[in-house]
Image: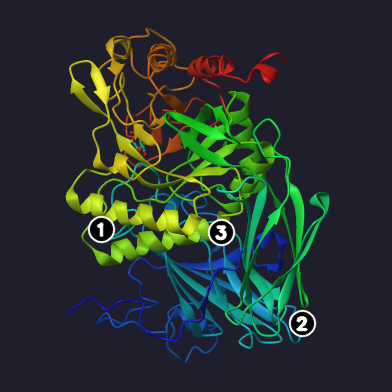
């Protein structure tokens, strides 16, 4: 019998993503939630594996000893939301399974307005009930989702029950193998969003990639009665009424000459969108990104992406990061290393991280977790990847600092993989409208002894030749960098999305000994000397800014469940290789800032 999908076709209150959460009227549901750890999913399946909404979702208090009840949220343990469960409770360190979350809350409801339940992210498979009624489900651990709850909220106390299951799945995105900790739970903020009956749900305000000095604006309204919206950009003296059609959409192209956003001048403009009864404010940067042969052009000028890769893991204490403070610390570390670019690996990071990078002048590579051995032949897997791509682009399309959408990481080559990714790249291009480059982390090939390149059909559909290579760590010893040279036949920018090697901060010794800081320092010295010889190199994001937890890293006393390739330790110690990278980037600083 086919496994009974938990996602039966019951009423589903899922709603198209409401964008720009920081500007919306929200009642936070963050805080201590009651939880039940349920490895056998006893709260959802009966002993014949039939799913039911009449289990823990009913959130009954255990009060009548004459009745049989085998759970009671009110007497069970707490977990902090947002936050993963693995780093909050020692007994959940390795836990992969279901945890039930329960929050009882009394909302402030304004008559005549609409209410939505918003989740910044939940890893991995989530089902949501409000007052015992199922609202719907979501699959995917790193993208937002929301449900309309207008008319479903009680005036007084409400019971919100959420089943989160982080078990890895072969057909999942990512699949069962990954080199990062499988942090489960309500890992990003949860809130009740209140809007007018009719409101501006989504919009795009971007500099046209095709016509100079032209801003393209598109709007999508929800609800009836909005015949036009007005776009204000005071500093640009824009005050433009835009008609909204029967389909709830409207658009306009406006001539103007904004100051262009760049890492050296991360100029953001206050914008305001006013519709009947709704006002939405945002900060928008304007820039163009394009390629010309092997050059990446930002605002028509060649740039070198002085980057570093980053996992979404909190500084100092590990666990999922989610706050502006976490973001600021991690991004400041990148800036200290003379970076103007960050690769947010291997999944969409939280919205605070992208926005803080935009404010700080850091370009971004944003990626969906189509990672390693995805099931290329499974249509559900493609639909999942496509949904995550759509949600990543929907949420962040107005963040001008994102210049690369990445659709994959280190995926074994095959016809099925090429078809899957070619289709996904086309979807990304269509969704994005040409305002960004499409990339993926491919892998290098040694095409002749000592001669490296990338021989991957995917290169034809990407805008950059982006790939991971570990010469000197997985591929030979650091000395191999000295004798490796590179050849490329495709006239596109070369971007190395990963290179590096491990070291335990504070472990010093013979540079020939792996995991000493001296070994990592020597590797980076030889590696950057090799990078200087690569024709058409337009950027790189060494792996990785900070040591991060991984279940694949077992060497006692050295790794202890940490991938030690960080240039900074999980406790914030700069390793010697950090300064090699910092100094190599210093030589690539634009002349103006190099003088400082
Ligand atoms: C791969 C992969 C990373 C991984 C790294 C490593 O390149 O993309 O996710 O952490 O190698 O082995 O450290």
Q: Can residue 317 be seen here?
A: no
Q: Can residue 41 be seen here?
A: yes
Which of marks 3 and 2 precedes in the sequence? 2
Asked if labels 1 and 2 touch by Cβ distance under 8 angstroms, the answer is: no
Is ligand 1 less than 8 Å from the beta carbon at label 3? Answer: no
Camera-near label (3 vs 1) is 3
Instruction: Looking at the picture, tell me which residue is in the foreground, 200 or 104.
Output: 200
344 is higher (above) or lower (below) than 24: above
Does residue 89 appear left or right of residue 379 in this picture? right
Q: Residue at x 37, y 19 (%)?
A: 534
CA gap, disc 3 to disc 1? Answer: 27 Å
The N terminus, quarter of image: bottom left
Residue 209 at what x, y percent from top left?
56, 47
Camera-near label (2 vs 3) is 3
Instruction: Looking at the picture, tell me which residue is in the foreground, 41 or 229.
Output: 229
594 is higher (above) or lower (below) than 279: above
CA gap, disc 2 to disc 1? Answer: 45 Å
Q: Quadrant of ligand 1?
A: top left
Helix, strand or loop at label 2? It is loop
CA gap, disc 2 to disc 3? Answer: 26 Å
Per the rendering, the mark at residue 395 is 3
Q: Which residue is mark 1?
A: 170
Residue 402 at what x, y percent from top left?
55, 45
Residue 503 at what x, y percent from top left?
41, 22
Residue 192 at what x, y percent from top left?
65, 72
Does residue 415 appear left or right of residue 226 in this picture? left
Per the rendering, the mark at residue 366 is none
Per the rendering, the mark at residue 110 is 2
Which of marks 1 and 2 precedes in the sequence? 2
């Amino acid at each position: 019998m086919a496994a009974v999908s938990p996602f039966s076709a019951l009423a589903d209150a899922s709603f198209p993503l409401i964008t720009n959460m920081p500007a919306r009227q929200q009642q936070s549901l963050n805080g201590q939630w009651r939880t039940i750890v349920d490895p056998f999913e006893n709260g959802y399946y009966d002993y014949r594996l039939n799913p039911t909404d009449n289990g823990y979702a009913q959130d009954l208090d255990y009060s009548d000893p004459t009745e049989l009840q085998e759970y009671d949220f009110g007497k069970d343990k707490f977990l902090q939301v947002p936050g993963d469960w693995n780093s909050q409770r020692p007994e959940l360190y390795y836990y992969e399974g279901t945890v039930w979350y329960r929050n009882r809350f009394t909302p402030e409801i304004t008559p005549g307005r609409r209410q939505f339940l918003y989740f910044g992210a939940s890893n991995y498979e989530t089902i949501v009930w409000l007052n015992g009624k199922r609202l719907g489900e979501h699959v995917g651990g790193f993208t937002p989702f929301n449900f309309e709850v207008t008319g479903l909220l009680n005036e007084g106390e409400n019971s919100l029950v959420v089943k989160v299951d982080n078990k890895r799945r072969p057909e999942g995105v990512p699949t069962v193998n990954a080199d990062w900790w499988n942090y489960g739970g309500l890992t990003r903020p949860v809130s009740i969003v209140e809007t007018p009956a009719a409101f501006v749900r989504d919009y795009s305000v971007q500099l046209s990639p095709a016509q100079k000095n032209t801003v393209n604006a598109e709007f999508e309204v929800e609800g009836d009665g909005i015949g036009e919206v007005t776009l204000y950009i005071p500093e640009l003296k824009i005050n433009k009424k835009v008609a909204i059609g029967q389909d709830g959409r409207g658009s306009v192209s406006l001539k103007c000459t904004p100051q262009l956003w760049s890492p050296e001048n991360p100029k953001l403009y206050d914008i305001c969108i006013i519709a009947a009864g709704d006002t939405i404010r945002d900060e928008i940067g304007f820039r163009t990104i394009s390629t010309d042969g092997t050059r990446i052009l930002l605002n028509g000028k060649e740039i070198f992406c002085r980057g570093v890769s980053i996992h979404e893991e909190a500084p100092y204490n590990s666990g999922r990061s989610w706050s502006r403070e976490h973001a600021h610390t991690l991004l400041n570390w990148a800036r200290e290393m003379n970076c103007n670019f960050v690769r947010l690996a291997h999944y969409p990071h939280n919205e605070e991280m992208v926005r803080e990078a935009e404010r700080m002048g850091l370009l971004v590579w944003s990626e969906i977790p189509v990672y390693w051995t995805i099931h290329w032949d499974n249509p559900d897997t493609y639909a999942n990847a496509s949904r995550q791509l759509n949600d990543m682009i929907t949420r962040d399309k107005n963040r001008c600092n994102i210049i690369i959408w990445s659709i994959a990481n280190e995926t074994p080559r095959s016809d099925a993989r090429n078809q899957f990714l070619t289709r996904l790249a086309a979807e990304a291009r269509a969704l994005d409208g040409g305002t960004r480059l499409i990339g993926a982390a491919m892998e290098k090939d040694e095409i002749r002894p000592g001669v490296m390149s990338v021989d991957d059909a995917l290169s034809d559909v990407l805008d950059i030749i982006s790939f991971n290579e570990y010469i000197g760590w997985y591929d030979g010893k650091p000395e191999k960098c000295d004798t490796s040279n590179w050849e490329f036949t495709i006239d596109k920018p070369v971007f190395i999305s990963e290179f590096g090697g491990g070291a335990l901060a504070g472990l010093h010794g013979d540079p020939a000994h792996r995991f000493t800081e001296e070994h990592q320092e020597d590797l980076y010295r030889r590696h950057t000397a090799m990078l200087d010889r690569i024709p058409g190199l337009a950027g790189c994001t060494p792996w990785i800014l900070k040591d991060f937890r991984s279940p694949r890293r077992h060497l006692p006393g050295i790794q202890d469940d940490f991938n030690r390739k960080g240039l900074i330790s999980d406790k914030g110690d700069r390793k010697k290789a950090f300064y090699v990278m910092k100094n190599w980037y210093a030589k690539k600083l634009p002349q103006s800032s190099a003088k400082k």
